Amino acid sequence: METSFKQLIKNTLSLPQLWAVIVPMQVFGIYAIYNILAGNAPSWWWVTLVIGYVCFKMIGIAAGYHRLFAHKGFTVNPFIKRLILFFGILAGQGSPIMWVALHRGYHHRYTDKDGDPHSPKDGLFHSYISWMFKKVHITVRPAIDLTRDPDMLFAHKYYVWIIYGVHIAAILININLWLYLFLLPMFVTLHCFLVQTCFTHVSKLGYQNYQTKDNSINSPWLFPIILGEAWHNNHHGDARNPNLGGRHWWELDPTFWIIQLIRND
């Protein structure tokens, strides 16, 4: 869908997820990276980045939003579910209900066809980031099961406020703690997710284990960036399987190793 630059600005100003979360995340994320390159960051920045990446990307988004909430690939006890949900919120990619509705009802239903919100068939820049700034109607019907869960409804209603509350508390404790434990991992997690949605659907960049009716691929070269999510064709071929790797010896999935520790099924 073609969208004018003027309309993109209007969308940014009218959607809280964009002006309150995504746009500030880019500004401060770039600032954090600049500080690291300029030698102004504390020596422990990489430790907090790894901790944040594990919590937000691997547990919150990959294990939680994606494999647990969207595809119900495993079960956990209520405490672990709420902890995973909390990490997913802090990743800054939207409320769980809207994330799951978009993923189930649009990406998987219309993969690489009209209706898929971030397919590379509409251009790499669109697939990577500009799709988020194109205002389209998203129904919650594909995630109707989550609307019956009080935890999910609370997270959906107070999503932005939870993020701001945690970030303000971190700033009050130590601004570097906020910048390198919360903000930078949030920024890195988002762009790892965008790499996943974009390049794991470019057929020339990988291989398929499953003959799916889409362009999903497995990409060994993406593994250092997005870990187990690099085996994306495996996911499209067997969506409910929480282990995205394992079809070949090199298809490792560290997120699944974490899932094995926390699941109760």
Image (spheres, helix red, strand yellow):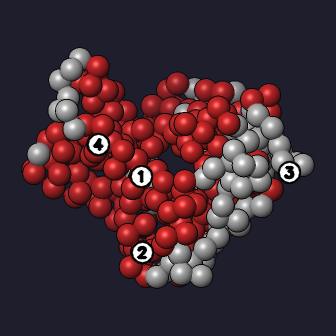
- Residue 182 shown left or right of residue 177 in the figure: right
Q: Earlier in the sequence, mark 3 or mark 1?
A: 1
Distance from the alpha carbon under mark 3 to that under mark 2? 32 Å
Judge whether 227 appears above or below 77 on screen.
Answer: above
Query: Is there a contact, CB below 8 Å, between mark 3 and mark 2?
Result: no
For label 2, the SS is helix
Judge whether 43 appears above or below 264 on screen.
Answer: above
Q: Earlier in the sequence, mark 1 or mark 2?
A: 1
Residue 24 in the image: state x and y as whole percent.
Answer: 32, 37
Residue at horizontal 45 percent and vertical 31 percent from the top: 9
Where residue 80 is drawn, which disc sits there?
2
Residue at horizontal 51 percent and vertical 78 percent from the top: 76
Quarter that holds the C terminus? bottom right
Distance from the alpha carbon under mark 4 to that under mark 1? 11 Å
For label 3, the SS is loop
Distance from the alpha carbon under mark 1 to that under mark 2? 15 Å
For label 1, the SS is helix
